[in-house]
Amino acid sequence: MNKFLIAIVVMAALAASAFGDLVSERRNLMPVPKEVSFAEGKLRIDKDFSFAFTGHSDGRLSAYLSRVLKRLEGRTLLEFSRLAEKSKDEATLMIDVDSGGNAIPKLGDDESYELRVESDAVVLNAETSVGAMRGLETLLQLVEADEDGFYFPLVSIKDEPRFAWRGLMIDSARHFQPIEVIKRNLDAMAAVKLNVLHWHLTEDQGFRPESKKFPELHLMGSDGDFYTQEEMKEIVRYAADRGIRVMPEFDMPGHATAWLVSHPEIASGPGPYEIERRPGVFNPTLDPTNPKTYKLLEKFLAEMAKIFPDRYMHIGGDENEGKQWDANQKIQAFMKKNGLKNNHELQTYFNRKILKILTKNGKVMMGWDEIFQPDLPKEIVIHSWRGQKALADAAKQGYTGVLSNGYYIDLMHPASEHYKVDPLPADSPLNDEEKKRVLGGEATMWAEWVTPETIDSRIWPRTAAIAERFWSPQKVNEPDDMYRRLNVISIRLEELGLTHIKNQDQLLRRISNGQDIGPLKKLVGLVAPVRGYRRYQILKQSMLFPLTGLIDASQADPADAMAFDKAVEAFLESEDKSRSAATLLVFFDDWKSTASELRVLKKDAPALQNASVLPDDLEKLSAIGREAVESLRTGKASDDDWRTAKLAEIDEIRKQKAGVEWRVIGSMLRLVRAE
Ligand code: ACM
């Protein structure tokens, strides 16, 4: 579908709602600041744009500003001076910071800032360098253009985050992600004001951190895909320079196969072990009754504690089904002797030992909600993946927590669904004191189905919507306006080297076997990958399977399907159906010709073999849509037999093929059911 049509549909939606006000109130800001007030007028950006530090300045902040200038230059095609003005009266941008703050960020650091764009200058005030970084990102988001060039609208902003813990978890274990991937994602995180990289480093499918104490761990557990200690330190530095903490996760006692490849003696069941290649939950588990387990962990965790300065260390603790424990006579005897009544008690016994090691190394323990046990010290952090109730229960009992349930971006839900989830929902059962214990949330990028080529497209742009949930006031919650801003932010993320948009064409070129990708591009505009854990059942792919199929090229929020939703909504609501029908008929014509083009394309594109019925589906959808619009337009209500037949047809079409589903089914059903 062409851009012109999308613009018409979007404008119609704008006119139809109170949404117009939000456009002027929020412009392209994401996350929306706590207080923002625009005024009439513009501050033009020209080649004389200059800056001055009027308070504290440091190398970290200067370097950040330098990168910001580069991005501004890239957009405006102007070159700016890198010399700070001596006199603040001469500078376009005055940065007034009280102190550098923590060079290595800590939970609860001051990230507040105030930003005023006046007719002759921009003033940015912050307590700390990191606050100024957050303000600089806002300033970049303010850039707009008209026929005379680029400008900042006049505005006054006072901003600070709603939650102190705003994270993205990246699983580098299932599929290894080289440090360039981590770095560009850290840049994107800073752009939307996220402040924690939770780095999931060990799994059944890979052991990624280099250990100098036990080199066999990474050498035998990683296929050679591991991070050297220097690289991990580099990531910590890179993140700190952007005001982002790095918390590592070493998942234990379950999810542990890759540890056991080199150390079968600390397993709870007989080896030998090999790196796991399948997705899923597996039995290999560390032996909590074996002193050798703690000897290894004591040295390994002390080694990691030195590399990762963050106070928090995540020990996973999830999905230990205890099957190896049940089957091991020695472990059963140990439990009996020590009065441990079940596997949860045995895991708590293990957690206490780990807690001691972490405490000795100055670390606070964090783990998935399975680690929760009401007599652990109150300082530990519960990371809830199973639900908001787990988080609330922990908070009621005095524990701090972070929410990830609802933010599983690997499951390919639309951004709007994640956006609805609030770490502290309006109907939260917690009192004010307990609410303070909910520190924030984390989006989780589990890596069963992502490679360095596709991971950005699973994280972005949806994570920007989640970032807004963690930073902005709760009342910022209109999905249409979120999507409007998300589309802008998504393109701006590309200036940081993110590949979430451009790699789609790259994949489509490969899938089409070198043919023109036009028809395939239209197809992926209308389909989305299956949601939730269905991919596991449908495709049966291993960690070695190439992730270069149609499902990998398609995305959670396909643009044309969303434009179609809007067009159907406008059509169904319109008084004059013969006029509004035209927009929909353009879609249906387009689908019909795309179907023909796809039939030609697939002849020479074997990678589309398992998707070969999609062109037929598309042609059928086009025909059904035409018939529905025709009957609604002429006021000649379609009969029940027609409706029943078409609904049955849609029921067939809606079944997944090649792991993707038509994203237009909901609106097609509305059209067919409308009377
Ligand atoms: C998890 O998803 N097992 C934390």
Image (cartoon, rainbow, N blue to C red):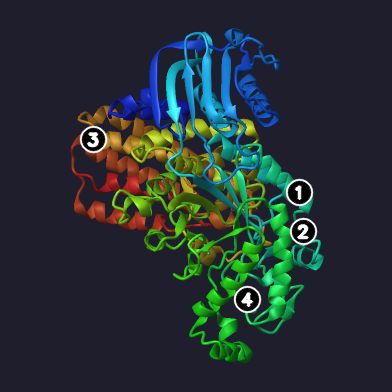
User: Pointer 4: residues within 10 angstroms few (<14), some, or many (20+)?
Assistant: many
Q: Is residue 254 above or below residue 87?
A: below
- Tell me, for residue 573, which label it has, or none: 3
Q: What's the CA distance linking mark 4 and mark 3?
A: 58 Å
- Sequence-wise first label, 1 or 4: 1
Q: What's the CA distance linking mark 2 and mark 4?
A: 21 Å
Identity of the amino acid at label 4?
Thr
- Tell me, for residue 185, which label it has, or none: none
Q: What's the CA distance linking mark 1 and mark 4?
A: 28 Å
- Sequence-wise first label, 2 or 4: 2
Q: Is residue 7 above or below residue 364?
A: above
Q: What's the CA distance linking mark 1 and mark 3?
A: 56 Å
Which residue has dot 4 on it?
285
Q: For the residues labelled 1 and 2, say whether their Cβ atoms are less than 8 Å apart.
A: yes
Residue 531, given in percent of the width and then of the height, sits at: 46, 56
* Relative to 438, 346 lies left or right: right
Q: Secondary structure at mark 4?
A: loop
User: Pointer 3: residues within 10 angstroms few (<14), some, or many (20+)?
Assistant: few
- Sequence-wise first label, 3 or 2: 2
- Tell me, for residue 231, which label it has, or none: 1
- Sequence-wise first label, 1 or 3: 1
Q: Is residue 274 visible?
A: no
Q: For the residues labelled 2 and 4, say whether their Cβ atoms are less than 8 Å apart.
A: no
Q: Secondary structure at mark 3?
A: helix
Which residue has dot 2 on it?
210
Identity of the amino acid at label 3?
Glu
Which image quadrant for residue 481?
top left
* Along the line of sight, the residue nearer the viewer: 594 or 142: 142
Q: Residue at x 73, y 65 (%)?
A: 300
